[in-house]
Amino acid sequence: MIPPERRRAFYEMQSRTNTLGRPGTPEDVAPVIAFLCSAESAYLTGQTLTVTGTPGTSVG
């Protein structure tokens, strides 16, 4: 479990650095997952999709 003070620090940092001003939620990611599970994504191969709310970020 993440200690409450670390969790608060994370959310504060996200508010300052994220274009949308908040951390992502499961509801933010769900449409991307639904797309990947659908037939519409059948021709998509070899891609990394980053769902962060902030352009130009990646997790290595």
Image: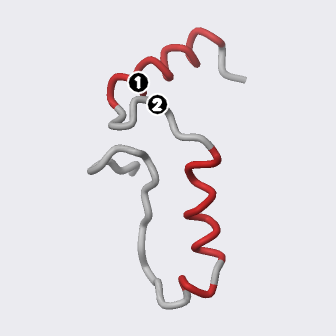
* Name of the residue lying farthest toward the left: 56
Residue 21 or residue 51, whichever sits in front: 21
Q: Tell me what residue is drawn at x 32 percent, y 29 percent.
A: 17
Name the foreground residue: 15 vs 6: 15
Q: Are the two marked residues, 1 and 2, in contact with CB atoms closer than 8 angstroms?
A: yes
Label 1 vs 2, first from the N-terminus? 1
Q: Quadrant of residue 34?
A: bottom right
Q: Quarter holding the N terminus?
A: top right
Picture coordinates of residue 6, whole percent (x, y): 56, 15
Residue sitting nearer the eye, 54 or 6:
54
Residue 27: x and y in percent read 63, 48
Q: Secondary structure at mark 2?
A: loop
Which class describes the residues within 10 Å of circle 1: few (<14), some (14-19), or many (20+)? Answer: some
Relative side of 51 to 28, left or right:
left
Q: CA distance from mark 1 to mark 2?
A: 5 Å
Numbered label attached to residue 22? 2
Helix, strand, or loop for circle 1? helix
- Spot occupied by residue 24 in the image (x, y as percentages of width and height): 53, 40
Per the rendering, the mark at residue 28 is none
- Find residue 15 and name its label: 1
Give the amino acid type for the residue marked by disc 2 in the picture.
Arg
Disc tally is 2
Looking at the rendered structure, the kind of residue marked 1 is: Ser
Give the residue at x 43% y 47%.
Answer: 52
Residue 9, position as x, y percentages in the image: 49, 15
**In this rendering, is residue 27 above or below 10?**
below
